[in-house]
Image (cartoon, rainbow, N blue to C red):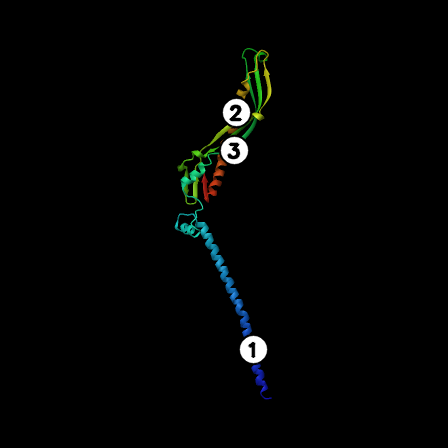
Amino acid sequence: MADEPVVDEERWRQYQVAREQRIAYKEKPRSRVGAVLLGLLIFFVLGGAGAVWLLRHVGNNDAAGKVASYLLGGRETFNTSAPDVVNQIQRLNRLETVSYSVDTVVEGKHQNTVLPDLLFGDRLILVVHGQVIAGVDLSQLKPEQVKVDGRSVTVDLPPSQIFTTKIDTSKTKVFARTTGLLVQADPSLEMNTQKMAETQILQAASNDGILDTARANARLGMESLLRGLGFNQVTVH
């Protein structure tokens, strides 16, 4: 009976040792999981920074750009050659950027300076629907008008111009026609009046700034085209 306290003390010691081992076993995997998560976080942060660096330098002509292009498979996102850019633009040929439509009333007549119109006059009133189309002829673009510097490009467009002025005969109507009692109607009067209408419509379009609008629209279209080719800094004059 005297040995029982020794036995109980030995059991208690074994219990404490086992308990400490269980605690150590449970804490160890947790520390490993934390280390793995931290490593993954660092990996993704560094990978994202590297990807941003590559995208910012790819296409440049400096050393960093060459390294970025090589790591991304050696592909060029756009052609930095000015002649090739000129060729791409010239393919658009006549770039129609604005269409001006107008309805106008035009009078054409033959008058006799001595005899009254009631007897010898010929008068025509037309309601004319016309259209004026303007834009920029990009086929006239010259290589010296395009300057390329890395991912920056500057383009001096040719001047805007009127491409066509035409009368829509299907929407043009004779409003009134009066012919003197002693003369026959002139068959060419309507055609001549339409030519007068073309001149008036062109003048109206010019007064409304059709050439300025055509150039502004051409600049917007050209900026969109050049950014589509890969340039990130575009200046169009």
Residue at (50%, 62%) from the top-left corner?
38
Q: Position of residue 162 (x, y in %)?
A: 48, 29
Q: Indicate the amino acid at tag 3.
A: Val
Dot 3, how many residues are within 10 Å of its Cα: few (below 14), some (14-19), or many (20+)? many
From the viewer's perspective, is residue 23 above or below residue 155? below
Instruction: Identify the image quadrant of the C terminus.
Output: top left
Q: Which residue is mark 2?
A: 198
Q: Residue furthest front?
A: 73
Q: CA distance from mark 2 to mark 1?
A: 108 Å
Q: Residue furthest bottom?
A: 2
Q: Position of residue 220 (x, y in %)?
A: 49, 38
Q: Which residue is mark 1?
A: 16
Q: Earlier in the sequence, mark 2 or mark 1?
A: 1
Q: What number is the disc on residue 98?
A: 3
Residue at (49%, 30%) from the top-left corner?
163
Dot 2, how many residues are within 10 Å of its Cα: few (below 14), some (14-19), or many (20+)? many
Q: Quadrant of residue 143?
A: top left
Q: CA distance from mark 1 to mark 3?
A: 91 Å
Q: Earlier in the sequence, mark 1 or mark 3?
A: 1
Q: Earlier in the sequence, mark 3 or mark 2?
A: 3
